[in-house]
Amino acid sequence: MNFIDTHTHLFLKQFKDDIDDVIDIAIRSGITKMFLPNINSETTDSMLQLCEKYPGNCFSMMGLHPCDVKKETMEKELLHVEEMLEKEKFIAVGEIGLDLYWDKTTLEIQKMAFEFQIKLAKKHKLPIVIHVRDSFLEAIEIVEKLNDENLSGVFHCFTGNVDDSKRITDLGNFYLGIGGVLTFKNSGVDKTIEKIDMKHLILETDSPYLAPTPYRGKRNESKYIVNIAEKLSEIKGLEIEEVAKITTENALNLFKI
């Protein structure tokens, strides 16, 4: 039984003291592949070094996180993304998108950075990994505008309703990233996911953030994909082996590993 953690920031400082153990435990738990979204130019080297150390297990993406879109550095950061996509091999452009939770004043430049990176993804024929905290409507309007046969991706950390999910699946080549919030009491995500076909779902942790119940509030790790899968199997009335099979196939189909 193999799983893929399609979104995990294992290169961050929260793992600096025990990253080898974290990856070893994840692999022994059946999470054989871990996909690492970039954040900004300062995280690129540590991400690539980790993937070089664990070839076949860790795979890197390239992108500028919306929380790191700043007027004074955006041009330099986007140039870094563009140059890295030309010279290194990545599985996706991410983590990109919009975030209106922390700073609403940068929305317009966030949109510019998002559109620029979507176009890079289309140029390089790579999927996009989309961050949409408090910004789903603004983000999906952009994706709908730019969508064509060359665009695919995942809406990371999906917490929307059934109507939101339909707008995503209607795009044609997009998935919903399901993480620890699925296990949170009163999140409502379980009620939504109950109505969505498994063929649209992939699993993620967003480590070190958003650890699932009963580890909520603690450091998240890729091994907790199993806890998320268990909750999904309960909601869907499927054996966990079937959840592993379907979500792994979905992830491989999207990321072309």
Image (spheres, rainbow, N blue to C red):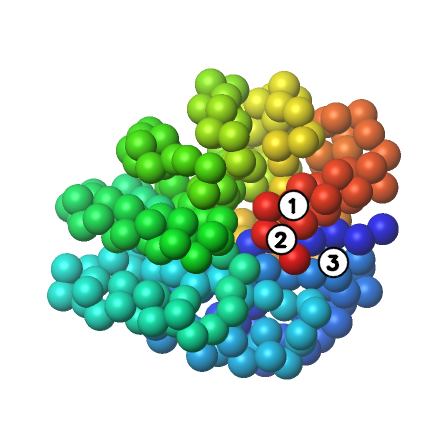
The circle drawn on residue 31 is 3
Percent of width and height locating residue 64: 34, 60
Side of 141 where 211 appears, left or right: right
Residue 29 shows up from this direction: yes
Percent of width and height locating residue 66: 31, 53
Relative to the observer, which residue lies in front, 162 or 16? 162
What residue type is disc 2 on? Lys
Side of 38 where 116 appears, left or right: left
Circle 1 — which element?
helix
For marks 3 and 2 on the same chain, the one whose residue lies earlier in the sequence: 3
Circle 3 — which element?
strand
Q: Quadrant of residue 137?
A: top left
Residue at 27% of width from left, 63% of height from top? 78
Q: Is residue 18 above or below residue 196?
A: below
Q: Quadrant of residue 40?
A: bottom left
C-alpha distance separating marks 3 and 2: 17 Å
What residue type is disc 1 on? Asn
Residue underneath mark 2: 256
- Is label 1 or label 3 in front? 1
The circle drawn on residue 253 is 1
Relative to the observer, which residue lies in front, 187 or 173? 173
Relative to the observer, which residue lies in front, 140 or 135? 140
